[in-house]
């Protein structure tokens, strides 16, 4: 049984309700004083507190958070992780940190994609250039890729045949031979003579106008500018079936000043270089003078006239009559040449 002395000692150890909280974890303190100190180390209320008013804890050395995973751990539905915030920055100008080694936030653009700066991106942008870069003016020097491509496009020919000035230059290999093939060109020129019946004398020009005549143009008869071949066939048609005159066609590789209709033709010294020669035609005839035939025609099939074009692929003609005759007003002429081009 407990004696009164023991009871007194017990009361001292338990202490009084008025005992103040112990100020240290050791020393001479009653149970109530130590318990008050213990209670004071717990938060006074539930809920989130500041660090100074919260208990410090430590995870066990063999324990991990539910959101922490070892390397190469396979993902699974329902896994939890720590949400990382990022700041939207539509334009990145300057640096969001001031000191090397400082922490900073992630930055995203207006669509939520993460801003990433390649250390070589600035140099790459300079190499590529901008859309509005002007075309490079030389093949060397400091130009962006866009500028150089724009320069090349200026000299890139379009599809299809073009003039030499608008074509890409090429060179045949030194050990290669090139087989050149010609072509046959059939080209015509036509006109309507004036609406008059003025009689022609032998050697007069037959043209489309007295005051503003136009030279006959056999367009693109040559395959290549400055090249040519042989004229192998020529023919004339007119819609005057009664016409029986003989004709001569003078040819040039450059256009000359044209004489008017019914004017005596002249050959000029100044035109000697561009003069190709002339083709004579026998008398015109019709297929049947009493039937429905409405044309007269003549042709020269015995040609072997060499020609070379000038500054274009065209050659030009002046038609004259070898006979005096009275024409029918406003009649048409169709003159056709066949060329065998060899280069």
Image (cartoon, helix red, strand yellow):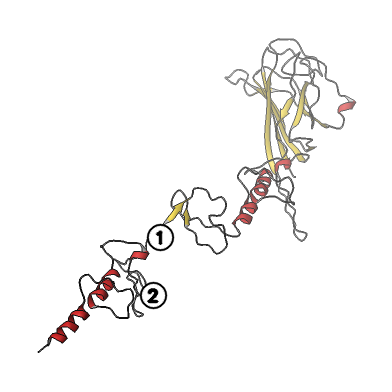
Visible in this render: residue 334?
Answer: no
Please give the count of numbered marks on the rendered protein: 2
Mark 1, Cα crowd under 10 Å, few <14 / some 14-19 / many 20+, is: few
Mark 2, Cα crowd under 10 Å, few <14 / some 14-19 / many 20+, is: few
Which residue in the rendered view is the most extreme toward the right?
A: 269
* Marking on residue 84: 1
Q: Nearer the viewer, residue 189 or 237?
A: 189
Disc with the residue nearer the chain's start (1 vs 2): 2
| Residue 327 percent location from the top left of the image | 71, 13
Q: Nearer the viewer, residue 175 or 170?
A: 170
Q: Nearer the viewer, residue 302 or 230?
A: 230
Residue 42, compared with residue 107, is above or below; it is below
| Residue 248 percent location from the top left of the image | 78, 25
Residue 337, compared with residue 76, is above or below; it is above
| Residue 258 percent location from the top left of the image | 79, 21
> In which quadrant is the N terminus drawn?
bottom left
Looking at the image, which residue is at 61% across and 20% down? Answer: 294
To which residue does mark 2 refer?
70
- Provide the secondary structure element on which disc 2 rests: loop
């Amino acid at each position: 049984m407990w004696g009164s002395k023991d009871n007194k000692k017990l009361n001292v150890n338990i202490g009084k309700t008025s005992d103040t909280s112990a100020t240290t974890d050791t020393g001479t303190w009653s149970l109530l004083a130590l318990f008050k100190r213990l209670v004071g180390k717990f938060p006074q209320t539930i809920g989130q507190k500041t660090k100074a008013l919260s208990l410090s804890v430590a995870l066990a050395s063999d324990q991990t958070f539910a959101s922490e995973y070892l390397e190469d751990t396979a993902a699974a539905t329902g896994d939890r992780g720590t949400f990382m915030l990022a700041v939207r920055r539509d334009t990145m100008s300057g640096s969001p940190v001031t000191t090397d080694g400082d922490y900073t936030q992630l930055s995203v653009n207006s669509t939520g994609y993460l801003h990433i700066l390649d250390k070589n991106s600035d140099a790459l942008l300079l190499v590529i250039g901008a859309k509005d870069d002007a075309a490079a003016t030389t093949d060397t020097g400091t130009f962006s890729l866009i500028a150089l491509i724009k320069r090349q496009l200026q000299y890139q020919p379009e599809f299809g045949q073009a003039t030499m000035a608008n074509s890409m230059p090429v060179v045949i290999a030194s050990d290669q031979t090139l087989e050149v093939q010609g072509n046959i060109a059939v080209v015509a020129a036509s006109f309507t003579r004036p609406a008059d019946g003025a009689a022609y004398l032998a050697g007069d020009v037959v043209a489309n106008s007295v005051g503003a005549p136009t030279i006959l143009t056999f367009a693109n008869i040559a395959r290549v500018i400055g090249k040519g071949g042989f004229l192998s066939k020529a023919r004339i048609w007119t819609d005057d079936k009664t016409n029986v005159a003989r004709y001569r066609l003078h040819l040039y590789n450059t256009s000359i000043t044209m004489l008017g209709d019914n004017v005596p033709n002249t050959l000029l010294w100044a035109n000697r270089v561009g003069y190709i020669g002339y083709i004579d035609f026998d008398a015109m005839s019709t297929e049947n003078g009493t039937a429905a035939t409405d044309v007269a025609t003549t042709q020269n099939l015995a040609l072997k006239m060499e020609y070379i074009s000038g500054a274009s692929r065209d050659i030009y003609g002046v038609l004259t009559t070898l006979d005096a005759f009275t024409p029918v007003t406003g009649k048409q002429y169709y003159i056709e040449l066949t060329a065998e081009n060899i280069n």
